[in-house]
Amino acid sequence: MSKENSIVILDGGKRTPRADILVDNKAAGLFSHFTTTQLGGMAVKATVGNTKLDPSLIGHVVMGMAQHSHRDSIYGAQGMRWRGGLGNDVPALTVARICGSGAEAICLGSEIILAGMRHDEDRPFMVVGGAESMQYPFSLYGVRGHKIGAAVQKYGPIDTKTLPAGTHLQDMLLMSLYDPSAKLAMANTAEELGRRYGIRREEADAFALRSHINAKKARDAGHFDEEISPVTLSSTDSGKDTVVKYDTHIIEEPSLAKMAKLPPAFEAEGIITAGNASAVVDGAASMIIGKESDAEKHNAKPIARIAGMGVAACDPRIMGWGPVPAVRKALKKAGIEGKDVDIVEINEAFAPQAIACVRDFEKMGIDPERVNPMGNAIALGHPLGATGAILTLTCSYALRRNKQRYGIVTMCIGGGQGIALVLESLA
């Protein structure tokens, strides 16, 4: 591949920590006051400040976001762009491929550059990534055009005291996790995949335990430090600031015995529990990409090349299997085989979903021990639109740290899809 047709990720990409949407399931999460665009802006600002590149060479922003549910989310990537400190002359595009949005932003940004039709030759680099505040609101439907209180509701705030008795609000988080095409919630699709692969509860819990153990080891060894930009929270009560440095969901002393006590969360006889499903967290990540020839021209340091991409679809009733055909496609595009892969970062939406994919990866020649060596979403969390970008940073930095060559980033996507990137280390 020529340097003119090679897309590289520059050294310096950053992410926020991933913070649970609730603290100990008792209080509002640490990032509960931030919208998706605010979190994305933090990641963009940290990346632009950390990447040794003149910001005037950045010509576009492409950021993923799964759910447009916050007060400013209609502005999406544009809000992240200005909050990240980039000028009003830099256009921004919001990408939505549900759980794959952060990875899709990287793919689409790469394709915009290579296609050339909209690529700015004078500002040849692009910020890409994703963000998600999972603090989705509770919503009220069916009142517009109806009399509420003294007037017919057209727009504006609603005085809740004027609502009729028995009015119910719907949780947008729970609503978004139900797929009407499959007639199943996301967790139930993973239960179905578990049945088809004969996965037992004990296997699911063991997989979850491994995720927490690996994540804790990686955190304690400082492996996440170069990718995380700490977030400072101001306190109006104590007057003391709180600095969030790490992902908050990692269990300090995990055990199979503790996990075995957790009841099934979605089906009476199911194997998915609160302990072996992905954590619901808020977070964001971004990085700068460009042609390898432009990186060389502007003395920018690339950390990895995007060697292959793959997106695939599958039966929505087993949506979690989507990474398998996506990885096959990405490997083919990269011109490598499974045995060549050093690290796989697969989003652990649910333990049985990930286990099923790992079994099929092994048939491709991918060693299961090379999958999620630093833990993943069960221990670290899954902020929908951000996950693909976060895993890309984690994989890129790990390849450099371990002096390895090839990595895969992949995830399933609600509705029955999968997306994958093959990364080749250049560091």
Image: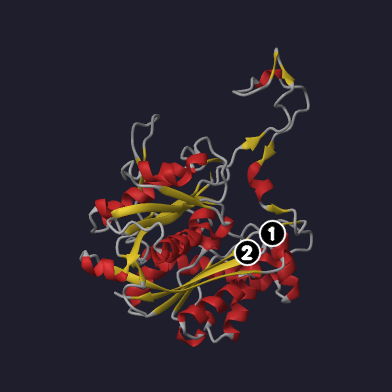
277 shown above or below 30 = below
Residue 372 left/right relative to 47: right
Residue 104 left/right relative to 276: left
Which colouring convention does the figure follow? secondary structure
Q: Is residue 174 visible?
A: yes
Pick the residue in front: 309 or 192: 309
Q: Which mark is residue 187?
A: 1
Q: Quadrant of the C terminus?
A: bottom left
Pick the residue in front: 396 or 276: 396
Q: Position of residue 252 (x, y in %)?
A: 48, 60
> What is the CA distance from the residue labelled 1 to the residue labelled 2?
7 Å
Question: Looking at the image, is mark 1 or mark 2 earlier in the sequence?
Answer: 1
Please give the name of the residue rendered at 78% of the width and 27% of the height, measured from the top-left corner: 166
Q: Quadrant of the N terminus?
A: bottom left
Q: Position of residue 350 (x, y in %)?
A: 63, 64
SS label for mark 2: loop
Dot 2 crowding, Cα within 10 Å, few <14, some 14–19, many 20+: many
For badge 2, the amino acid type reads Phe
Q: Which mark is residue 379?
A: none
Q: Classify residue 315 by image quadrant.
A: bottom right
For badge 1, the amino acid type reads Ala
Q: Position of residue 303 (x, y in %)?
A: 31, 70
For label 2, the residue is: 350
Q: Position of residue 17 (x, y in %)?
A: 42, 53
Please give the name of the residue rendered at 32% of the width and 61% of the height, measured from the top-left corner: 226
Residue 262 left/right relative to 287: right
Q: Are marks 1 and 2 in contact (CB under 8 Å)?
A: yes
163 shown above or below 93 = above
